[in-house]
Each structure stands twice: as C-alpha cells, then as structure tokens.
Amino acid sequence: MAEILTDSENSESTERPTRPSLAQVKVVIDFMQKHPDLAHRKLRYGMSHEKFKKLWIELSNTANSMKGAMKSTRGWIKFWSDKRRSVMLKQKQFNEGKIQDKITPLEQKILNICFTGKPAKRKKAVKKEPCNGDNGSADEIFSKDECDIEIQDTSGLVPTETDERHMNIMEKMVEVMDQQASALMQIAKATLNNSKAMGKIAEASHKQALAVDKLAGTFETINASAYDVRNAIMSIDYTIKRCFSTAATQHRQNTNLFS
C-alpha cells in the first residue's frame, strides 16, 4: 500500500522548497490527463471516496519522491485547485484584454483537462459517503473539515484581481530572493577565489624574499672576497716596497765602496 503523508508528517519540509518544481507540475498535469475525473468536481460524480483518496495518495507520493516541494495529500489537492483556478482566471483576463500574457503550453493542458468531458447528472437520492471513513477506520487521512475543503466545488471561487496581484507580487519576491541567493553564492565563490589568489601572491612574495636574502648573502660573500683580495694586494705592495727599499740601500752602499 502506498505510504500516506499527512499534514503532521513533514507536509512542508524545511529542507525542501515550498514551491513545486517544473517536473512536479508536469507530473501532476500528466496524472490529471490520465485521470480527468479527478481534476474537477463536475467530472467526479460517481467516483467513490476510496478511489478518490487512493488516486490522490498515489499522486502525492509520486510528486514527493521527486526533487522539489514536499506536501501532504491535502497540500497537493490545494495546489491543483489553486493552479486550476489561476489558469482559468488568466484565460478569462486574457480574453477580456486585461492582460497580454498568453497561455503557456502547460496552462493549455490544464484548461483542456478542465473542459474535457461533460459532467454526469447528480442522482437525487445519493447518500454522501463519510469523509472520515466507515466506523472511524484507522487508515483515514482526511479530517471532516479537510474533506469538506477538498471536495467542495471551487469553480465559482475565482480569485479577485487583488488576490492575483498579491500572488504575482509573492512570486516576484520569491524570484528576487532566488536571484539574491544566487548573487550571494557568486560573491562567496569570488571571495574564495580571491583568497586563493592572495595565498598564491603571499607564497610568491615569500619565495621572492628568500631569493633576495640569498642574493644578499651572495653579495656579502663577494664583499668578503674583495676585502681578502684587497688585503692580499696591499701585502704584495708592502712586500715589493720593502724589497725595493732594501735593494736601493745595498746599491748605494756598493757605490760608495767603489767611489
């Protein structure tokens, strides 16, 4: 049996985004195309509550297994209801010339689903099946209030223009927040690259300092060698001068002897 996800069991996970991903939206639309009697209350006459519950649990588990939002079964029902009404309102406003945005292919699929088929006639004496299940069974997933919200006809509850503007503003705010998060990530990445570059510069400076120190040592060695050479030259000069002085004195003495 499919796993049941209720509102008390991580219906809106804090670790996952609250807005469904494009892949999840496509899955919901494809599921509604396969089960059009689930898409709208007017197409749902004759469907048992058990089948209604089973199909929504199947869709919820499929959507929650994908990357994107994590919602309860009631959350996905509300998402589909809001999405359907929003698309129908957009189509109405576009036809009246109030907006210029055209219907997207996905939104057109939703409209096709909603207007597919004709609603069956309601039987006069049909006892409503309890939303909580017979005899309060343990596998109930909807409270009475939730079932009343989920199964009620919402085709007439078209949101006002103010509600639509608020929804558009919220969507734009979410997009701006996503852009800010991306910008912050890029700044962090640039800062990391900058720190790595500074580290390389510091390493190059250290190597340069070592080279300068080595060069200074070489100059000191050359200076010491030059000093030694100077001392040797002075010693040679002193020796030459001493020898020359001795030779000159002896020559004078010899000259005096012969004179």
Image: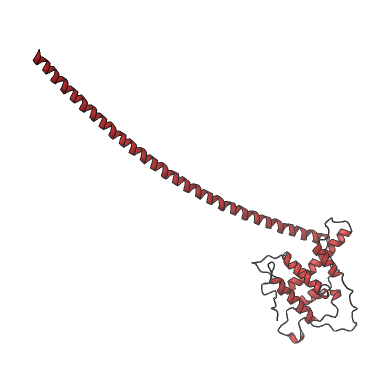
| Image position of 218 (left or right of 62) | left
Of residues 207 and 111, which is closer to you in this image?
207
| Image position of 135 (left or right of 238) | right
Q: Quadrant of the N terminus?
A: bottom right
* Color scheme of the displayed model: secondary structure
How many tags in the picture? Answer: 0
Q: Residue at x 28, y 33 (%)?
A: 229
Of residues 183 and 212, which is closer to you in this image?
212
The percent coordinates of residue 26 (x first, y second) are 76, 67
Q: Residue at x 36, y 38 (%)?
A: 219
Up/down of 104 relative to 222, above or below = below
Q: Residue 210: name its quadrant.
A: top left
Q: Residue at x 80, y 69 (%)?
A: 81
Q: Residue 158: name its quadrant.
A: bottom right
Residue sitting at the far bottom: 135
The percent coordinates of residue 103 (x first, y second) are 83, 60
Of residues 51 and 233, which is closer to you in this image?
233
Up/down of 233 relative to 77, above or below = above
Of residues 256 and 61, which is closer to you in this image?
256
The percent coordinates of residue 177 (x first, y second) are 68, 57
Up/down of 60 relative to 240, above or below = below
Residue sitting at the far top: 259
The percent coordinates of residue 63 (x first, y second) are 72, 71
Q: Quadrant of the C terminus?
A: top left
Q: Residue 180: name its quadrant.
A: bottom right
Residue sitting at the far left: 257
